[in-house]
Amino acid sequence: MIEKANILSKADLRRVIKRISHEILERNRGSENLVIIGLQKRGVPLGKRIAANIESFEDKKIRFGKLDISFYRDDFGKKIKADIEKTEIDFDVTDMNVILVDDVLFTGRTIRAALDAIIDLGRPRSIQLVVLIDRGHRELPIRADYVGKNLPTSQNEMVEVRLMETDGRDSVILVEKEEDVK
Amino acid sequence: MDSNMYNKILIKNGSIVDAQKGNIYRGDLYIKDGIIEDIKDVIEIDNKDITIIDAGGLTIMAGLVDMHVHLRDPGLEDRETIESGARAALAGGITSMVCMPNTSPVLDSPSLIKYVIDRGKNTGCSIYPVAAMTAGLEGKNITGMGLLSEAGAIGFSDDGKAVADSKLMFEIMRYSKQFGKPLILHEEVRSFSEHGLMHEGKYSTKLGLEGISRLSDDLMIGRDIVLAGVSGARIHITHISTSGAVEMIRKAKTDGIDITCDVTAHHLFFNDSHLESFDTNLKVKPPIRDVRDQKALIEGVADGTIDAIVSDHAPHLDTGKNTTFKLAEFGTIGLETLLAASYTILCRNKKQGFEKVARLLGSGPAEIVGIDGGIIRKGMRADIAVADLEAGYTVKKEDFRSRSKNSAFIGQKLYGKIIYTISNGKIVYESGLN
Amino acid sequence: MLNKKSILRIDDLTLDDVAKVMETADSFTSISKREIKKVPTLRGKTVVNLFFEPSTRTKTSFEVAAKRLSADMINFAASSSSLKKGESIMDTLRTILAMQVNLIVIRHSDSGTVKMVDDNTPVPVINAGDGKHQHPTQALLDLYAIRSRFEKFEGLRVAFVGDFLDSRVARSGTRLFEKMGMDVSLVAPSMLIPEDHSDLNVYSSIDDVIEDIDVLYMLRMQFERQDRKFYPSVREYNRFLSLDSKRLARMKKNSIVMHPGPVNRGIEISDEVMGDRESPYDNILIEEQVTGGVAVRMALLYLILG
């Protein structure tokens, strides 16, 4: 992997998350009937940070859940490892405005699987998508409602998101994949 | 004398047989409250209520233990009952009896074991039931050995038959280990013995009677020794009749197999030449075999290969025996002649020491089945037989107390009369009285 | 995702595999608790239940597992008596493979048949019980049930009680539990254990272990089987090997009782302990085993076809 560019610094990350948190409250006119679901695995710490922000702005607790979409993927059978994380959603999503949080939006297939998973749990009033980075190259008609940063990329590039909670540091960098040796 | 009144008995000046130590010594023996209170050279007690027995010239031995008896109760009470069998035993100096399960119904359930134990109480004789190894003695299904042991069975046997199914016999041996009770094995191969009436030999040919080959015994004994070796079971071969049996058991013991065996008094006393008279009372199973076998059995007693002498008391009505040799039932009674027959053939005839014979009639069988008995020692329960070994008599049919009178010894001159039998410190038999 | 293509016996699984199965089963347990008990994971895959021996529980358990993963399940009930041995099993196999299936779950009354099938197909095979040999999925669901009640496996004392000789459940269970560090013993009379039992810790009465045991595993006892059993009677069984409320009362706190089902009331376990619609005692895990069974089988299907 060759590092090509630094996209977001630690401070940038903090500001972006704060901004998105405010946008969510603005669009939904407060945090009534709002729930946040973080997509495993980095969507979870991101979602938690957003939830913390919203709670401090509104001075009200907001419900948070974690979602693992391993069982809903459509590339089943072609994966190399199965890293199943926990799905922990201990509230009913029916009639709620679900804020779905993920780190990078790419082909859209992960989000499609997440939509199926959430709808199997109930009938939400709405599902809104938060992503930190939108790197383009959609293969399905999926779009994010809240974007941290739009980043056009090429196929042989990768967006590497690192978070304190999962990786020990906060950073978003762009890397170039080396030649694949088959 | 009312035997119930006296709980103090002083037997004076008798020859006391210590079968365990293997010696006989002169002495006095004092019994009080059911226990042997004292044994000494001379015991003097100043007390009016003592019964004194002058045992001058008499032998004092532990009450005999007969570990193979058929009491036809339940089912065939006209031949013998538990009570009548006990009366007969006491007349023979026998104070402990082990009875076999081939009654009707067979002793294969805990309630029947309890029945026998119950009926045996208060007869003056200690009666110990053996339970069946297979249900109904059918040789197909193992009995509930655990529950039977807990009900009081002191061992297991299918006596009257062997278990033909070798795999089943093996599983019986393995299972028996869990409960620590011996398996008492009657060894007979049906295909060899099926139509046989007496020992297969010169005499069976001469008399024109179908013979039972030694193979009937030896094959089964060989099989069971192998099975016992692999399973580690505790087995006891009962009523052996062949020289081969003695050899195999002798070897098995040195090989470390947990095995013991017994022989009947009639197999020691007789050989097949005695059947020339076609006396149906000598028709027994296993058959009385030839001189060679008889000699081997007597030697087996001498060298300790044989651990007990039994009666295999098998009562039959006159109707069962007063018929052709072919149709007659197998078996002879033996409780009342056990001591005399053993003493006569082994000690008088073959000059073996009586203390050894006494052991095979006392502590030997007691140890095998794990019961008290056969030991004369201070503090032990007072089960005593006082006998006049020198008294000779001719065995007569009318003299038997048993309900059945089919004795192989009728007409024989035997030595060794029981004068008194004491059970649990009470005189329960006195010769000359009823 | 598992170390081997097929699961024929416990030794086909590494410790890592076992851990994966346990964790994955947890995820499926939560799915089985929600309203929509289905995920699209195995959509389009075909699983065949090839049962040569009758079964309700195991067969149904696999069926539910497959369907909750959105797989298609085909039930092929072959009867051993109408088929000749060996050759016809191969013909049956050819027919099934010609239908392009993705996984075969097989149960057969002859030990080792499952291996024969596995050797003759590239498709993964799960052993649902072959003769008296193994029943690995049962052992795994049993482990899962134990896991739900105990912090760790190491040092747990387990006793299998009853007919060890005929039990594939006991064979797989012993192998797996020992692998996980448990202390396994056997309570059985001589006729229900092999002649050579030098590698087993054997007791002859349930009373010998009842006060020290953490897991009491009761094995099914059938008195009517064709092959000779030699065990005397139900009453004798009750005296030495049955679980009744008196014995239950003597067990350690937090100990559990398991059974592969179906229970022969009055033989392995008394009516009183079993209760009417459910047991009055909370350390009887029998229904939990079944519930866990679906989750564990879902985990296996997921890990094999993934």
Image: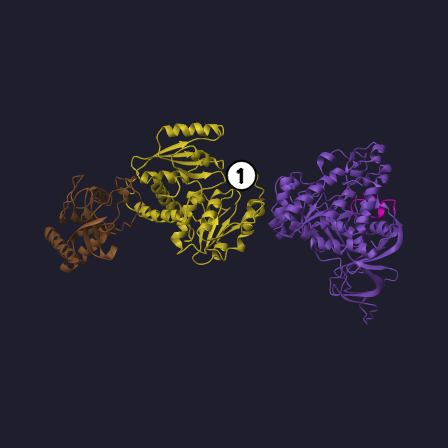
Name the residue nearer the viewer: A150 or B239.
A150
Identify the image quadrant of residue A140: top left
Hue used for the chain lettered A:
brown
- Going by the image, does C109 lie left or right of B258? left
Q: Is residue C214 left or right of residue B340?
A: left
Q: Is residue B409 magenta?
A: yes
Using the image as rendered, state which of residue B152 and residue C253 is in the foreground.
C253
On the image, the x and y values in percent for residue B387 come to 84, 57
| Range covered by the magenta-colored residues | B397-412
From this view, report whether residue C132 is shown above or below residue B120. Answer: above
Q: Which residue was labeled with disc 1?
A: C224
| Residue C116 seen in this snapshot | yes
How many other residues sit within 10 Å of disc 1, few (<14), some (14-19) or many (≥20)? Answer: few
**Position of A31 relative to A76 (above/below):** below
Q: Position of residue B99 (x, y in %)?
A: 71, 48
Reply above or below: B196 against B153: above
- The tint chain B carries is purple
- Chain where mark 1 sits: C
The percent position of residue B190, horizontal first and vertical second, equals: 71, 36
In the image, is residue C134 part of the stretch drawn in magenta? no
Residue B35 sits in which quadrant?
bottom right
| Residue B99 showing in the rendered view | no
Horizontal side of residue B67 vs C163, given as left or right: right
The answer to which quarter of the image holds residue B226 is top right
Q: Quadrant of the C terminus of chain A?
A: top left
Q: Which chain is yellow?
A: C
Q: How is the image coloured?
A: by chain
Q: Nearer the viewer, residue A180 or C302?
A: A180
- Magenta residues: mostly which secondary structure? loop
Q: Amino acid at mark 1?
A: Glu
Please provide percent x and percent y for residue B329. 77, 38
Local SS, label 1: loop
